[in-house]
Image (spheres, rainbow, N blue to C red):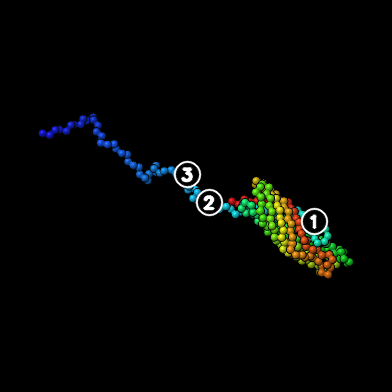
Amino acid sequence: MQAAAPEQSAGSQPSASRGTAREAAPSPSSPSNAAAPTAAAQEAAAQLLPASPPSLFRDVELSAGVGGVAQTFTVGAPDYETWFAAHLAAHLGSRFRAGLLAGFGTTTTRTLGVAGHQSDSVSGTPFVIAAEGGACSLTRLELCGSAVAGVRAAHGTVSSSTLYHPSDAWLARPDVGLLARARYRFSFGLFIAAEAWAAFPLGDGSFFVQGITSASVPLPLVDLSASLQVGWSWQIL
């Protein structure tokens, strides 16, 4: 005779199965399971990125101004004339500088001073264009020194009431020298600068009236010019 299984009352709860039920493991693809990168990992990843190369040009500047020039000759006293200058330059890296400069002076006039030509004269107007390269200080009042090489030209004319065929002529020769410059830059790009330039033309030459060489206008042995300039600079990112 078989024993009957004990009946389960209607209000009773089913007995728990053996052991403890395990929670389902979250899926690896679940967003909530993604591990946030640590600060060390982020720093290591940043170090792996290539560094951007430094800019070749720190800033570019353009300036113009007026000053004076003393022209020294082999004989006689120097001529002092007004000098007009313009300057375009760029700062390379942190200290180096390269640029172009140009200038011209007022006209120098010499009378012929010979019999029959006392009212006649020969005039010469100087022009210079050159390249410069040098180094500068890293201070707010920037101090620069540069070597300069270029061309010095002059335009000669004759003013005469007695010569039948007055004419003009150009004369040019290489020019080397040294440039000293001080620049104070304001916060919004405007700056003021003072520069002094000693130029040494290579070779000699002069203007004269054919047949009347006693009143020639020679090119100077040394040009000493100084100018005060105002300009603007652009930062290069």
Tell which tag, 1 or 2, sits nearer the viewer: 2
Could you tell me which secondary element the residue under label 1 belongs to? Answer: strand
Q: Are marks 1 and 3 in contact (CB under 8 Å)?
A: no
Say which element carries label 2: loop
Give me the disc on residue 161: none
Quadrant in the picture for the N terminus: top left
Q: Position of residue 177 (x, y in %)?
A: 72, 58
What amino acid is found at the position of numbered circle 3 in the picture? Answer: Ala
Q: Which of pointers 1 and 3 indicates the residue nearer the eye? A: 3
At numbered mark 3, what does the secondary structure look like: helix, strand or loop? helix
- Give the mark, 1 or 3, whose residue is nearer the N terminus: 3
Instruction: Pick whichever of labels 2 and 3 is earlier in the sequence.
Output: 3
Q: Quadrant of residue 26?
A: top left
Residue at image coords 27%, 36%: 19
Q: Which residue is mark 3?
A: 40
Q: Is residue 63 visible?
A: no
Q: CA distance from mark 1 to mark 2?
A: 54 Å
Please report whichever mark, 1 or 2, sits nearer to the chain's N-terminal start. 2
Relative image position of residue 179 (x, y in whole percent): 71, 55
**Is residue 231 rendered to the left or right of residue 167?**
left
Task: Give the x, y percent position of residue 197.
Answer: 73, 55
Residue under the point 83% across and 58% down: 77
Mark 2 is surrounded, within 10 Å at the Cα level, by few (under 14), some (14 to 19) or many (20 or more) other residues, namely few
Residue at x 21%, y 30% (from the top left corner): 9
The relative height of residue 217 versus residue 10 in the rendered view (above or below) is below
Residue assigned mark 2? 51
Front position in the image: 21 or 9: 21
- Mark 1 lies on residue: 80
Viewer-nearest of labels 2 and 3?
3
Q: Is residue 42 above or below residue 80?
A: above
Q: Amino acid at mark 2?
A: Ala
At a point 75% along the width and 65% down the height, the residue shown is 203
